[in-house]
Image (cartoon, rainbow, N blue to C red):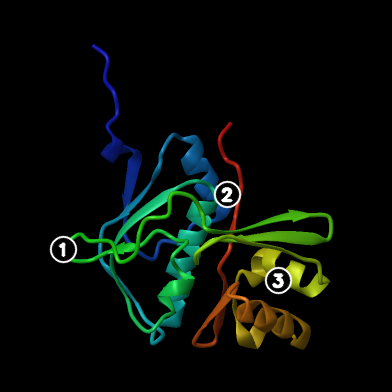
């Protein structure tokens, strides 16, 4: 007798707040899983910047390896228009707070000394190249993808602030979060 997996069985149930590295996410993709289903609702607010940025970083990194995240909850006090490239929360009634992106709508790809940003969160697509070394580093350095402001030197803070003006970083409390999805192809 042949047994097939249904779509629901390809999602791992997990509680919110479990931190996983990009390498762990790659291993999950390689195992054949398609995403996560969070078992408890989350309420993202600026009053708890650590929880908000940790979850948003998880959504960003999961998208970067092709995993979906099904989660329930709310986003209050954060600029939702900057987050629409990530998997949305579902309300208590099951409605999505914003449409599910069919593909990542804010991405960075890098070459030697530059990054190409593609942003289609708004109407139309904006593509632009960043080649200022500090800005490139801010977008590509894993240690700067979610960082406390107190850990930044003046050059990194200036670069991140400049990128935030273009919608590529988000400040929640004293924590800075890189928003673009960085692809890491995990399928072998």
Residue 86 coordinates in the image, percent (x, y): 45, 61
Residue nearest the observer in this picture, 162 or 128 = 128
Residue 82 coordinates in the image, percent (x, y): 48, 72
3D distance between C-alphas at marks 3 and 2:
20 Å
First-in-chain label (3 vs 2):
2
User: Which residue bears the numbered disc 1?
Assistant: 93
Q: Is residue 90 left or right of residue 146?
A: left
Where on the picture, by quarter, is residue 117? bottom right
User: Which residue bears the numbered disc 3?
Assistant: 138
Q: Residue at x 18, y 66 (%)?
A: 92
User: Which residue bears the numbered disc 2?
Assistant: 23
Q: Is residue 152 shown to the viewer in this render?
A: no
Where on the picture, by quarter, is residue 141? bottom right
Which label belongs to residue 48? none
Q: Secondary structure at mark 1?
A: loop
Residue nearest the observer in this picture, 9 or 125 = 125
How many other residues sit within 10 Å of disc 1, few (<14), some (14-19) or many (≥20)? few
Q: Is residue 40 shown to the viewer in this render?
A: yes
First-in-chain label (2 vs 1):
2
Image quarter (top left, top right, bottom left or bottom right) of the C terminus = top right
Q: Is residue 31 left or right of residue 94?
A: right
């Amino acid at each position: 007798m042949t047994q097939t997996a249904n779509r629901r069985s390809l999602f791992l149930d997990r509680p919110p707040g479990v931190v996983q590295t990009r390498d762990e996410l790659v291993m999950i993709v390689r195992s054949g899983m398609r995403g996560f289903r969070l078992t408890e609702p989350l309420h993202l607010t600026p009053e708890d910047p650590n929880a908000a940025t940790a979850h948003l970083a998880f959504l960003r990194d999961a998208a970067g390896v092709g995993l979906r995240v099904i989660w329930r909850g709310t986003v209050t006090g954060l600029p939702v228009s900057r987050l629409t490239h990530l998997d949305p929360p579902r309300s208590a009634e099951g409605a999505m707070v914003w449409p599910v992106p069919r593909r990542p709508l804010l991405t960075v790809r890098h070459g030697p000394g530059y990054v190409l940003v593609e942003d289609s969160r708004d109407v139309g697509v904006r593509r632009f190249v960043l080649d200022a070394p500090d800005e490139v580093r801010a977008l590509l350095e894993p240690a700067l993808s979610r960082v406390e402001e107190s850990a930044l030197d003046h050059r990194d803070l200036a670069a991140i602030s400049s990128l935030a003006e273009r919608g590529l970083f988000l400040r929640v409390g004293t924590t800075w979060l890189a928003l673009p999805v960085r692809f890491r192809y995990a399928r072998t």
